[in-house]
Image (spheres, grey):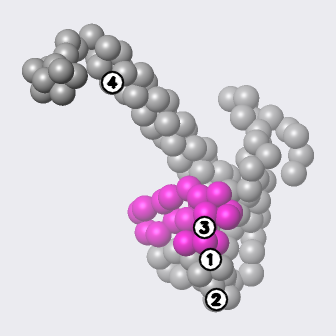
Amino acid sequence: MSGNRARNGTAAIEGCLLWLSEAREIAIYQRDGVAWIADFRGARAELFTVGEWFALNGGGSPLRRAEPASPLPPRMVERIERLHAADDRARLLSGLLDRLAGFCRELVPETNETRMASR
């Protein structure tokens, strides 16, 4: 994979698309030095590291029935980038919520139950 950067600053995605059935395609690619699989099942899509995907899919058994690989078309690269953007936002939001919960715990006074247990 080349070190080319896309317009938004993320590494350009290069990989291949495997057609498994009418309702399922997978893209295998590298992004920012990590090997990924985007698993498209109809209108649904999920991101996995290659290791996660192989562990969850019987060591890659679905690949046995795949059609020959083709380069990732631009429309698929756009869908993958949107998946990563949503995943990044969810991870950021989760971290912010964890921090907020910790802050709230510090603000909340001891409850009667906590006070009774410390006696």
Residue on which the image places disc 2: 65
Which secondary structure, mark 2? helix
Which of the two discs, 1 and 4, labels the residue nearer the N terminus?
A: 1
- For label 3, the crowd category at 10 Å Cα-Cα, with few meaning under 14, some 14 to 19 and many 20 or more, is some
Q: Please rate how many residues cluster around mark 4, counting C-alpha atoms within 10 Å: few if below 14, some from 14 to 19, many from 20.
A: few
Residue 70 spot, x, y in % from top left: 75, 70
Q: Is disc 3 in contact with disc 2, using a CB cutoff of under 8 Å?
A: no
Check disc 4 and give the amino acid type. Ala
Up-down relation of residue 100 to residue 107 (above or below): below
Which residue is most to the left? Answer: 112
Q: Marks 3 and 2: which is nearer the front?
A: 3
Q: Please provide the residue range marked out in magenta.
A: 37-56
When the figure is inspected, residue 36 is found, relative to residue 5, above or below; the finding is below
Label 4: which residue? 101
- In the rendering, which numbered label is found on residue 19? 1
In the image, 5 versus 35, the foreground residue is 35
